[in-house]
Amino acid sequence: MNRDSVTFILHPAKNPDDVKPFSSVDGGLYFDVFCYTDVRSQLEEFRTKGIDIVKGPDLNDFFSEFTFQDIDGYRISFGG
């Protein structure tokens, strides 16, 4: 999947039980994927589409960030 200058490459797992969000593992990070982008415009697009934000948004002049969760439980963060 491509969008602007970002490319996601996904590979199917041989064993479906191996597929789980790392963010759900005890001691794991709060995100499974992190993408640097224009946070404010991405956030506005998500809001207009009614996408739920599960962390943030944390907006400031130094670094801004927010996280949403997809239907499979993977948490995707945008920051920049």
Image (cartoon, rainbow, N blue to C red):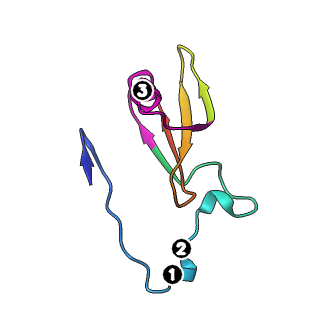
The structure residue drawn at horizontal position 74% and vertical position 59%, both measured from the top left corner, is 27
Residue type marked 2:
Val
**In 3D space, how far apart are the residues under numbered discs 2 and 1 (Cα atoms)?**
5 Å
Quickly name the residue at label 3: 48
Name the residue tied to disc 2: 19
Check disc 1 and report its element: helix, strand or loop. Answer: helix
Q: Quadrant of residue 59?
A: top right
SS for dot 3: helix
Residue 41: percent from left, percent from top:
38, 23
Along the line of sight, the residue nearer the viewer: 57 or 28: 57
Residue appearing at x 56%, y 39% in the figure = 67
Q: Residues under labels 1 and 3: Cα distance?
A: 33 Å
What is the distance, in whole Å, between disc 3 and disc 2 at their CAs?
A: 30 Å
Reading the image, the residue beneath label 1 is 16
Task: Name which of mark 1 and mark 3 comes first in the sequence.
Answer: 1
In front: label 1 or label 3: 3
Q: Which residues are magenta?
A: 35-54
